[in-house]
Each structure stands twice: as C-alpha cells, then as structure tokens.
Image (cartoon, helix red, strand yellow):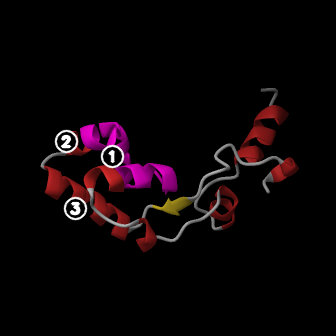
Amino acid sequence: MAANNYPHPSDGDLYTPLTPQLVDLFWHMRDVHGTWRDVSAITHTRLKVLRDMRDGSRKAISLTKLDEMITATECGDLRDFVWFTPEDLIRLGIWDDFYAGLEEYKKRGG
C-alpha cells in the first residue's frame, strides 16, 4: 500500500503500461475502423485521450477501459497484456506515488 497505508486513488482496477504493442493495437483499431474520430465514437474515448495514449503522455490504461475498447472494436485480446495494481506501477516507477506528492503539498502549506 502507498504511504500512510491509504489505498491509491485508482485502487480497485488493474492497469497495463502503455507499450509499443498496445500502441500498435490502437493503430490497428484505427486501420479497421477508418479514423481516430471513428475509434473515439465507437469506444466512447475522447480524441485527446487516444492521442495521449499514442504519444506516450499517458503511462498506463485500465483493464476496464481497454476491455471496453477491445469489445467495441473487436480488435485485440486482454490476455495479450500483463496487468498490475496501482501499487505495482508505483514500485516499478511507472507511476509517481500519489501520497508522497500530497504529503509534500501539505508541508508547503497546501
């Protein structure tokens, strides 16, 4: 568990890091369905989020969201990816510790 024994705010779901394999899957979804706008509409994912996932601005995607995208587009398989808890992603250095930043903010008078 994160600092102070509080669960991470994203606790309760599993996540997979955004890897080249996952970015290839997003491009395959686009190739099958035509445009990023079409993928966005089919998967109920904002265009900005799709762009952030492709360019590396986002570091991971939840199992729930990827399942929605795979089911809607009929492209890919959840079993092709390794899944982690939020705490695992923090330990691996993929995510920053939410509570460490919060403690620093409080120390500064926030």
Locate the N terminus by quadrant.
bottom right
Given the image, on which type of amino acid does mark 1 rest? Leu
Given the image, on which type of amino acid does mark 3 rest? His
Q: Which residue is mark 1?
A: 50
Q: Is residue 64 left or right of residue 95?
A: left
Whether the magenta-drawn stretch holds residue 95 is answered as no
Between tags 2 and 1, which lies in front?
Answer: 2
User: Residue at image x 68%, y 43%?
Assistant: 9
Given the image, on which type of amino acid does mark 2 rest? Asp
x, y percentage for residue 70?
34, 56
Q: Is residue 100 left or right of residue 44?
A: right
Q: Which residue is mark 3?
A: 28
Upstream in the sequence, badge 2 or badge 1? 2
Q: Crowding at label 2, few (<14), some or many (≥20) Cα neighbours within 10 Å?
A: some
Locate the C terminus by quadrant.
top right
Q: Disc 3 versus disc 1: distance between alpha carbons?
A: 13 Å
Viewer-nearest residue: 56 or 2: 2
Whether the magenta-drawn stretch holds residue 46 is answered as yes
